Amino acid sequence: MIERIFVAPWLSLTRLGEAQILLPLVLVAALWLCWRAGEAAFVRRWLFWLCAAAGLTTASKLAFIGWGWGVEAWDFTGISGHAMFAAASLPGLAWVLARSRGEWMQKCAVGLAFALAALIAYSRLEVGAHSPSEAVLGFVIGSAASLMSLRQAPALRLHPPAWLPAGVLAALMLLPFHAPPSKSHDWVTRLSLQLSGRSLPFHRWEPHRRPAAPKAQSAKQKPAFSITSKPAESS
């Protein structure tokens, strides 16, 4: 009972890293930047680095779920999607939404967004969904995507309308409690099985050993990933 009380806030916070929550907000901000603020070049750069980070994250998950490729010494089975999406999306959103408050407030907002993304990455440990290596790598990759997007960010010629920051903030406060459960992990699992031809996915807590080799070669053929602890469903 006590454990549930302490974990419940982390369960709400960790949902802020879900793609189904963040991607629509990024697209709304991107549409406004293109059609009203005339910043199509920035939008292309932002979406490119976001897609690159998402592609790398998805590839790491496919590799483990379908083929059992991971790093046992790091307890690594795939990059944390929640940590990556939070770090790749929130700083860009903060940069857009805080533009009307002045350059100093804009920089503070971006810094707070990175801090929130780091907290979301840590929440993946608290809810048992990822190991430290997976959460840290997700945050690092997402942060790199944001920094590559924002390093040449222009001074917006048009301040965002009041409805944009109000709508984004309302969504971030309400959707973690009311959005349906994310299906992204199920989709990645199905795709992994289709690509690998397996009927069952690899799991962190299962021993995945290659066929036994002759004793003379056993030193060269190490077992694939094998972890004993069972985490919550990750994404």
Image (cartoon, rainbow, N blue to C red):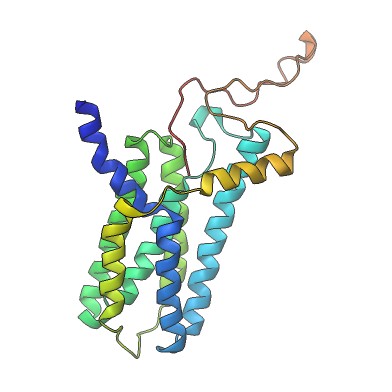
Tell me what residue is drawn at x 34 percent, y 47 percent.
14
Whether 207 is drawn above or below 49: the answer is above
- Tell me residue 29's x, y (percent): 40, 75
Determine whether, in the image, residue 25 is placed left or right of residue 177.
Answer: right
Q: Is residue 57 left or right of residue 116?
A: right
97 on left or right of 79: left
What is the x, y in percent for residue 179? 37, 54
Work out whether residue 19 can be spotted.
yes
- Image quadrant of residue 86? bottom left
- In percent of width and height, residue 199 lies at 70, 32
**Where's the N terminus, which quadrant?**
top left
Front one among 226 and 141? 226
Q: How many marks on residues?
A: 0
Instruction: From this view, report whether residue 50 is shown above or below residue 212.
Output: below
The reply to whether residue 151 is in sight is no
Relative image position of residue 28 (x, y in whole percent): 42, 74
Viewer-proximal residue among 220 and 212: 212
Q: Which of the 4 image quadrants contains residue 100? A: bottom left
From this view, report whether residue 105 is shown above or below residue 156.
Answer: above
User: Residue at the location (48% across, 77% down)?
Assistant: 43
Q: Residue at x 47, y 67 (%)?
A: 148
